[in-house]
């Protein structure tokens, strides 16, 4: 086909994203062409723009999208043309040690493809000025079309609006999945540090999981209000009071059972660790810079039996977990609409990125009419 489409391309780190004409191939074996209808803009996209997430450039941004399958290559079995789908940015290979060992979110081949800005097969199918360009984490959803491996698409019902569906692909899967896999028991007290796109979904996941109290910390009043709407029972502004003292005060000096860090800052990971009770667990979910380090009190690690662990992509297996999340949405347990605070066309991509940079609450979503 070699069609001309538009894509949001990052030419180089710290440059403006350009919505440019590109060409895209027809799908090859095992590949699927998706007409994008909505794509969320995530903090990781912004970190690619700044170079803090050192992905190869030029790069088609976007990894949180939903759309309609328009063509499939030979041997595709998972979807058919006209299917509505969510894109997953970790297309598990199903054959590496981690896929076979029950940790498909750590798939070695998907990780290599993400780092190299290619599909799972190593292919690059988008060309800008005749030269191949990379795609964000095997997807590149900020474009009129995305050509992806069939492992990257999960069918959804046509009743689910595209803008809400898109969020399932990153923020919801990551946040809800982190809560579902954490050691939360019914009635537990949970702390969520940072209630942006991912943190709000940790709040929802903890609520669904049966947490008794959900404490939220975020400097943005809008984020705190959203957190309360989605299940937080308490929310404080860390610029107005000492967050650790406030958490200890709220928990009879015990600390919380489980704390989540959803920003990606080492000092906040340490806060999560310090805020959990003896024997408690802190879960780091926000993505820090690749060279960042965290300092913990070593004595507490041993004598208080505290755990600091990570959660990548909500420890999810999208073909299994996205249908579960759709069921929870359908029954009203999982809220998607309140997460969307702003909508833009593809030409507004730099505005949406600026929303992230300036810390505006909720998600900005690019929609195609
Ligand atoms: Zn993301
Ligand atoms: Zn694998």
Image (spheres, rainbow, N blue to C red):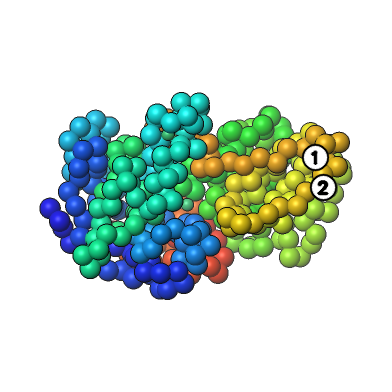
Q: CA distance from mark 2 to mark 1?
A: 7 Å
Q: Quadrant of ligand 2?
A: top left
Q: Answer above or below: position of 238 versus 278.
A: below
User: What residue is drawn where x is 34% and y is 71%?
Assistant: 18
User: What residue is drawn where x is 38% and y is 34%?
Assistant: 93
Within 10 angstroms of label 2, few (less than 14), some, or many (20 or more) residues?
few
**Tag of residue 297:** 2
**Residue 275 position within the rendered picture, expressed as x and y whole percent measured from the top left:** 78, 46
Q: Which residue is mark 1?
A: 301
Give whichever of 30, 228 is nearer the camera: 30
241 displayed left or right of 229 = right
**Residue 222 position within the rendered picture, expressed as x and y whole percent measured from the top left:** 59, 61
For label 1, being within 8 Å of ligand 1 is answered no
Which of the image's four quarters has the C terminus? bottom left
Image quadrant in which you'd find residue 201: top right
The answer to whether residue 121 of the structure is visible from this angle is yes
């Amino acid at each position: 086909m070699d069609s001309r489409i538009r894509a949001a391309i990052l030419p180089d780190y710290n440059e403006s994203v350009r919505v440019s004409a590109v060409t895209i191939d027809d799908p090859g074996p095992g590949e699927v062409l998706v007409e994008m209808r909505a794509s969320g803009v995530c903090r990781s996209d912004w970190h690619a723009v700044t170079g803090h997430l050192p992905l190869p450039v030029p790069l088609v941004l976007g990894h949180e999208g939903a759309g309609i399958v328009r063509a499939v290559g030979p041997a595709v079995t998972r979807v058919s043309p006209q299917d509505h789908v969510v894109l997953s940015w970790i297309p598990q290979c199903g054959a590496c040690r981690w896929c076979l060992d029950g940790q498909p979110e750590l798939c070695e081949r998907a990780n290599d493809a993400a780092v190299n800005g290619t599909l799972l097969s190593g292919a690059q199918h988008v060309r800008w000025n005749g030269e191949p360009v990379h795609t964000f984490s095997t997807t590149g959803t900020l474009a009129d079309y995305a050509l992806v491996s069939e492992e990257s698409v999960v069918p959804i019902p046509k009743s689910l609006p595209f803008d809400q569906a898109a969020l399932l692909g990153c923020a919801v899967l990551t946040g809800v999945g982190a809560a579902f896999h954490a050691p939360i028991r019914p009635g537990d007290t949970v702390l969520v540090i940072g209630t942006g796109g991912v943190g709000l979904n940790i709040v929802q996941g903890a609520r669904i999981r049966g947490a008794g109290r959900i404490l939220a910390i975020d400097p943005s009043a809008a984020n705190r209000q959203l957190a309360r709407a989605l299940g937080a029972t308490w929310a404080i502004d860390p610029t107005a009071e000492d967050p650790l003292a406030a958490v200890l005060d709220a928990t009879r000096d015990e600390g919380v059972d489980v704390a989540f860090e959803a920003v990606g800052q080492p000092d906040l990971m340490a806060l999560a660790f310090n805020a959990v009770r003896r024997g408690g667990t802190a879960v780091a979910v926000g993505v820090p810079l690749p060279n960042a380090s965290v300092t913990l009190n070593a004595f507490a690690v041993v004598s208080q039996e505290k755990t600091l662990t990570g959660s990548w992509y909500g420890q999810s297996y999208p073909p299994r977990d996205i249908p579960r999340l759709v069921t929870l949405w359908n029954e009203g347990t999982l809220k998607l609409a309140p997460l969307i605070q702003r909508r833009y066309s593809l030409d507004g991509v730099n505005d949406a990125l600026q929303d992230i940079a300036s810390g505006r609450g909720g998600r900005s979503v690019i929609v195609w009419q």
